[in-house]
Structure formats: C-alpha cells, structure tokens
Amino acid sequence: MRESALDGFDGIYEEFQPKIHRYLCNLAGDADAPDLTQTVFLKVNRSLAAFRGESSLSTWIYRIATNTAYDHASSSMAKQKDCEQLLDGDTSLDDFPDSRSQGTDREFIRRETTACILGLVDQLPENYRTVLLLSEFEEITNPEIAAILDISLDSVKIRLNRARTALRNAMECHCSLYHDERSELMCDRKA
C-alpha cells in the first residue's frame, strides 16, 4: 500500500475506493455505502491539500470514512424515530437456491452464514463494531485503529477483545456452527 499523496487524488481514489466502500458496507450497510463512499472521497478531495502527513494517508482516509458513517448513523436514527422501517426478515424467492444448479446449496449456505455473522456484528455496540470491522475485515493494525478513532492503543485492545467476546457469545446463542466436508465454517441459525 502506498502511503503518499504523490499520485494525486486519482491515484488515491483508485487505491482506496474499493477498501473504503467495503468498510462502509460493513459499517453502515450496503444500501448507504455507495453514497457514503462518494461523500468520503469528496471530503478527501477537498481536504487533500491540507493533509499534513501527521498520520498515514490510509489512517486519515479511514478516519474520514468512520466519521462520515457515524454522522450518517446519527442523522438516520433521528429520521428512524419518525417512521418505522419495513418488516425485517422479508424473504423473497430469490433468497432460495435454484435446485437445477449444481453447488447452489453450498452457495446458499455460505451466503446464509455470512449474513448471519454480519447480522450479529451489526448488533454489536458501535464502538465494538467499528474496531472489529477495522481489525478483522480491513486488516488494519491496532496502532492505526487507535489513530483512526483517536483513542489510545490500550482502548483499541480492550474494545477489540470485548467485541470478539460479544460476537462469540452472540454466535453461540444464535448459531449452530459446524465444519462441512471441505472444512469450511458453516452456520445454521437457531430457532
């Protein structure tokens, strides 16, 4: 990963856009991630000349992304109080495997496992969810997470430990985990 702004905005966008989009999908949801990603890079473009290099470029961009997602969550929660969301758990025929295709059962189970785990991650308190996503999904180091979130390294370690414990406990309550014949982790939701 290049850590300089020498490539200009186009190079930065090309390198970081997929990573920031994936991060925002996990932090804020698939529906909001494209708009939030665009907002992040508008902020990066506007502020690039003022970037002083006191932190790494990636730390600076992830901090902008995190703050943008937090701001969006705050405004969304205010809007949500005014109107209720559609029923969750809505299932369409597209969610079920096509029995005519080979391997669709495995792909369906894999999608369900991923959805189950991400659903549990989404239920974690925001400060735990953020450190977990940055560490496990974005593979950012603990010192970089501390800089992104503007907290101490010890706080990162504590939050990460608590997040992993909370996720493990939630998975034990909501999931039956097992390894299939290929030793891939699979999940069946408990009733």
Image (tube, rainbow, N blue to C red):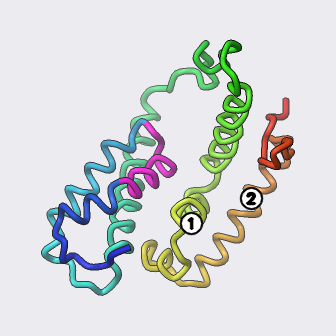
135 relative to 174 in the view: left or right: left
Residue at horizontal 49%, vertical 51%? 27
- Name the residue tied to disc 1: 131
Q: SS class of the residue under badge 2?
A: helix
- How many labels, in total? 2
Residue at horizontal 34%, vertical 56%? 68
Range drawn in magenta: 18-30
Q: Relative to the observer, which residue lies in front, 131 or 141? A: 141
Q: CA distance from mark 1 to mark 2?
A: 13 Å
Q: Quadrant of the C terminus?
A: top right
- Name the residue tied to disc 2: 166
- Which amino acid type is marked by label 1? Val
Within 10 Å of the Cα at label 1, are there few (<14), some (14-19), or many (20+) other Cα atoms? many
- Which amino acid type is marked by label 2? Ala
Residue 135 horizontal/vertical position (percent): 57, 67
66 relative to 182 in the view: left or right: left
Residue at horizontal 85%, vertical 49%? 172
Residue 78 horizontal/vertical position (percent): 41, 41
Q: Quadrant of the N terminus?
A: bottom left
Q: Relative to the observer, which residue lies in front, 92 or 97? A: 97
Rendered position, 159 above or below 32 = below
